[in-house]
Amino acid sequence: MNDSSVRDLNAPIGVQEIVARLERAGFETWCVGGAVRDALLGHPHLDWDFATAATPAEVIRVFKRTVPIGIEFGTVGVFDSQGTMHEVTTFRRDVNTDGRHAVVEFGASLDDDLARRDFTVNAIAYHPKSQEIRDPFDGRLDLKRGLVRAVGKASERMREDRLRALRGIRFAARFSFHIEPETWAAIRASASHMGRLSPERVKQELEKTMEQVERPSNALEWWREAGFLEELVPSIAMAPTERFAALDSLPRAEGALAKGATLSRLAMLWFGEKESVAAAATKALRFSNADSSWISSLAGASAELGRTIDATVREGAPSAVDVRRWVARIGRMRTETFFTLYAALWRARLANDANAIDESRIDALSKLAVIIAFRDPIEIADLAVDGEDLHKAGIKNGPAMGKALHVLLERVIENPALNTIDQLTEIAKAL
Ligand code: CTP
């Protein structure tokens, strides 16, 4: 493809200024990577990165405010006039790699630098002043025909960095692209080497998939087909297809709700697995304690209640007592998310099963469950009496007390009108 076609990719002013500044100091500089790819596709992308002939020391000298992000790999963080930080990386070529860590050499040209990149669509450079595009591997053609294709020899690109196998799948799923056969073969051949990836990187790829991909089921099924789930997240390697399909109807992260939306999608991955299984899997992937416990509590509740809820909903509208019992098991703060995931699972089942439960019934159940969670007594802390009250009424502290409180909660779940000091004290005395 012609290397010098002109097109305005609307690089922000701060981006143009960084290039101008480095070039005034005598260093050839280009925009590269994801922002160029996304701009060519017409997607907004805020994360403009640069490749330059300047060494890190020279970059630091040219700009007032810099951050040493990865000096040994040539990367310096530079702030533009709008206060946004960008990665500026010295043109480089790989001299050695071990599947995750590259040893790089500076003094390379732009073309050398593009040749070491993972996929053709990520190996396009753009010059915001001349608006020249450098595209030695026909990345624009692949963007047009919807193809993820490795730069040069696919098996070598994957061997240099196994994370690329996961990235390739993510890009294909995100843009609804095909994966070119040789690239796919190299991706698949990476399965047995996936153990090299740190759990943090695997988790990050899962998170990016949930954040960036509108319909993540394709990505997850590719992970499964390539053997990556078996290697990296074995607890969900045999998950029913509808669980992954359910991801597609859960909203993707946007704006202020970003963290919650991504966490809900991640929780869907284990929804239906035992709590202990989900807890072990999320800990192994280095989720924070809070996120791991959120995900595994939802999983545990769905494993325990799923069949009962299904059967009850099939028979008709569940009673308030049923729903209170479920909410007590799920937990007040998790109830809304639980039923959002539950509804998504049924939407996915409906696609293949004409006998699946009608969506309107699940919606009605979700609404009722949230009302009940915040209106009715469903936890011991909601009882009108506490341990001290019961002690005064003659119940001994210790196991007997715990048991009494649970019996009272059970009675109140059956009939919230009993939740007064007098009535509960009477019941407790009779125990
Ligand atoms: N890159 C690569 N191999 C990797 C990671 C990155 O060749 N394992 C190159 C690609 O050219 C990529 C660029 O570095 O476009 C920037 O990487 P990164 O910011 O991680 O990804 P993006 O392509 O920008 O995509 P996104 O931010 O959406 O993940």
Image (cartoon, helix red, strand yellow):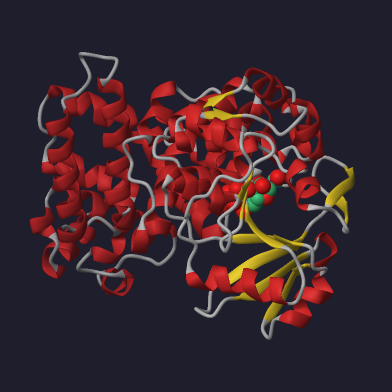
Q: Quadrant of residue 311?
A: top left
Which residue appears at 44% of the width and 63% of the height? Answer: 398
Query: In the image as oriented, which residue stretches furthest toward the bottom?
Result: 64
Point 66% across, 37% down: residue:
119
Image check: 337 left or right of 34? left
Location of residue 184 in the rendering, given as x and y in whole percent from the top left corner: 65, 22
Left or right: residue 70 compared with residue 136: right
Residue plotted at (28% across, 70% down): 386
Number of numbered discs overlaid on the protein picture: 0
User: Viewed as shown, does residue 257 lie left or right of 222?
Assistant: left
Q: Nearer the viewer, residue 24 or 418?
A: 24
Vertical relation: 391 (above or below) 118: below
Q: Mark yes or no: residue 427 visible.
A: yes
Q: Quadrant of the N terminus?
A: top right
Image x and y of residue 138, in percent? 63, 34
Closest to the observer: 258 or 293?
A: 258
Q: Position of residue 102 (x, y in %)?
A: 84, 49
From the viewer's side, name the closer residue of 71 and 291. 71
The answer to whether residue 232 is left or right of residue 216 is right
**Compared to 107, does 137 lie above or below?**
above
Which residue occupies the extreme left position in the image? 417
Q: Identify the residue at image location x=45%, y=52%.
A: 294
Question: Horizontal and vertical percent for residue 338?
Answer: 32, 44
Judge whether 423 appears above or below 221 on screen: below
Q: To which quarter of the image does residue 380 belong?
A: bottom left
Please say whether residue 400 is visible from this viewpoint: no
